[in-house]
Amino acid sequence: MENRVLVIGDELFGPKGEAANRFVEAVLCREPSRPIQFSVNVPVAVSLSQIKARLSSDVIGKNAGRIIMGLGLRELNHGGTDGASIALLYETLVNELVNKTQSRLFLLTIPPEMFPIAVSEVEYLNTMIREFCAANAPRTKLLDFAEFAETFKEKQMERGKFGRSLFMEDGSATSLCCMLLALYLQDKLVEDLKEM
């Protein structure tokens, strides 16, 4: 269904999925008369491999016109995997969705500060997300939240001591980060809805 939006993601959306819930509310506040339904599966408590195994029921079965995905951070946080292996699994997931659905896919990049112990792994994963979005265009659309958050951070630094942080020392999202992501997603979704 064209008016159905599925949001699937991990800790990128906040420890309890705060950004996803705020995003849904922001869209409904901005577009109160638009016929739109949301299915929010955030934060997922399973690995990318498990998501792939349950793709038919948990994702494809939702019959969404748009699927917003923010995945990969959970794998980084729970150890043992690097950016390259996560990217490979993520790409397999995206290819399967491209081949088995008519949905438009929106893929979020991860701000490197969310995984401070290995920034290079996040940057590699983001590069691969950008590449497979470009390779599968126009069905896949890049939502470069990493770049958006970096621009916001630079503007906050101009404020000096009055600036607020998007991330805690361990990389987890602050309330401000969740709000920023929610507003970013709202703008991108509304923009996409108006293009159709």
Image: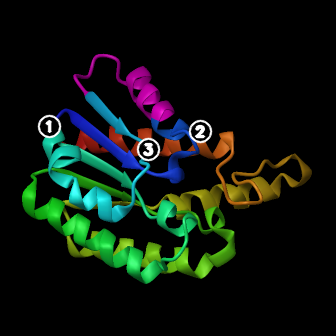
Q: Which mark is residue 126?
A: none
Q: Are marks 1 and 2 in contact (CB under 8 Å)?
A: no
Q: Position of residue 46 (x, y in %)?
A: 39, 54
- Residue 27 included in the magenta stretch of the image: yes
Q: Position of residue 186 (x, y in %)?
A: 43, 38
Residue found at x 42% / y 83%: 84
Alpha carbons under labels 3 and 1: distance apart: 17 Å
Left or right of 136? Residue 78 is: right
- The one nearer the camera, 26 or 64, is 64
Determine the secondary structure under disc 1: loop
Residue found at x 68% / y 59%: 171
- Disc 1 marks which amino acid? Glu
Which badge, 1 or 2, comes first in the chain's sequence? Answer: 1
Determine the secondary structure under disc 3: helix
Q: Pointer 1: what residue?
A: 2
Q: Pointer 3: what residue?
A: 185
The C terminus - image quarter? top left
Q: Main secondary structure of the magenta part?
A: helix
Left or right of 173? Residue 80 is: left
Which badge, 2 or 3, comes first in the chain's sequence? Answer: 2
- Disc 2 marks which amino acid? Met
Q: Pointer 2: what residue?
A: 179
Sort mark 3 into few (<14), some (14-19) or many (20+) by Cα contacts within 10 Å.
many
